[in-house]
Image (spheres, rainbow, N blue to C red):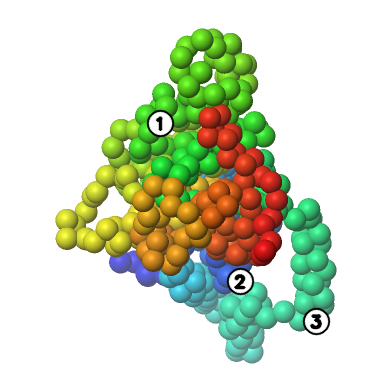
Amino acid sequence: MSTENQFVDTTAEREVMGALLFDSDIFPDIRSIISPDHFSDGRLAAVFKNFGEQYETRGHLDLTTIAELAHVPVPFLAQCMVDVIPSLAPGKARRLSALANKRMVRMRALQVLSQLGTLTVEEVARNFSDIAADVVTSSSSKAVYDSASLCNRVVKLQEARAERRPEVRGLEIGYSILGRLLKGLQPKRITVIAAATGFGKSTLALNLLHNIIIAGHRALFISNENDVDLNLDRLCAIHSGLKVKDIESGEHYQVACSFGETFHRSGIFMTDNSPRTIEEVVGTISKFVIQHKVQVVFIDYIGEISHSGDNRETEEARLARYAQKLVDCAKSLGIHMVVMAQLNRQGNSKGRPSKAELAGCFKIAQKAHSLLLFWQDERRRDVLTVEKNRQGPAGIDIEMNFNRTTQQIFENSVLTAD
């Protein structure tokens, strides 16, 4: 290895950039350690620079956008994300900073040595002293703020917060109460909808899909349970307000015309119900996000994803592994994912779900940013409970109006204790 190459770690450079693409939330920490100049690979330096500019302006951070801005191929960025561990990125960034400083020291020291014959002893000492001072400054200036910088930072924080108003920050979902609680469907997050067998978690997902598409967003619905024709019949009923059985009778051809007028040029994508492994699910998601700029993905439902891996793996461990892969996928692609899960109860059992009934999807809920429980109380009211919510209040019950003949689900109001 040459003297110059020993101060370069291209693997670490790719891993740091891959970690940022995987989870942009770590960018503030990485930015305080390195800059584009710390990358020896010019392509990665351009990627880091453009990523930072997009982050600062709240622009798109998807692979396609960053690749176009940095003039690099999308596969090059995708390869950087293979097997990265975001939590290790700060340590690797510090290594890149140290290596960059060593490269700078070497270059400037060689310049001084090349002029050794013409410099006085005092000038040599001053040059080397300047090099040492620059190393210390470059290593610490980004991590320590003076009084003026701190005051400026407070101003920028308040300006940024003001720009985030109104309260809803993510994609609108057509449900005003739920939208305010979740602050919309925000990127890099997962919402889990859990319900008993046959209660309506797929129908609720289709209502959300309908609302999101009508609002002009792009969404992919991956069905691991119901076939595409059944989902389309339900979606047509939701859109038209007709009964599903009337649509299935074939006597309402105008439904097809109305559906086509609304959705023909929309950003809706829907799979059939062919069995898929978690790797196939993630691959399908990645393809449609990169090629079609999908913003929201529905998984209906996680329990029907085909088993892959160790046959000795318990169902709980398997679902937890699937959930983690979906969380990682949502973060890396900058999308919101809505995942359906099943409660451990049969049929449409009445009453608030207990912790025991959550057992089957507990590990999934742990990974999620939001957990919504869909159930029916003793007065036969359909209830959507915001059980977990990292974006705002939790423990809120919303009464829903679920018309099971038309599959339409609307919000009524927040339920209060009797």
Q: Residues within 10 Å of mark 1 (few under 14, many from 20)?
A: some
Circle nearer the N terminus (3, 1): 3
In the picture, measured across the screen, residue 56 lies left or right of residue 94, that is right
Kind of element beneath mark 1: loop
Q: Amino acid at mark 2?
A: Ser
In the rendering, at what x and y percent does residue 232 appear?
A: 47, 25
Q: Residues within 10 Å of mark 2 (few under 14, many from 20)?
A: some
For label 3, the residue is 147
Judged from this view, the residue extending furthest toward the left is 311
Report the quarter where the C terminus lies: bottom right
Disc marking residue 32:
2
Report the quarter where the N terminus lies: bottom left
Disc marking residue 271:
1
In the rendering, at what x and y percent does residue 248 appear?
A: 45, 18
Q: Amino acid at mark 3?
A: Ser
Q: Nearer the viewer, residue 287 or 10?
A: 287
User: What is the CA distance from the residue labelled 2 to the residue labelled 1?
Assistant: 43 Å
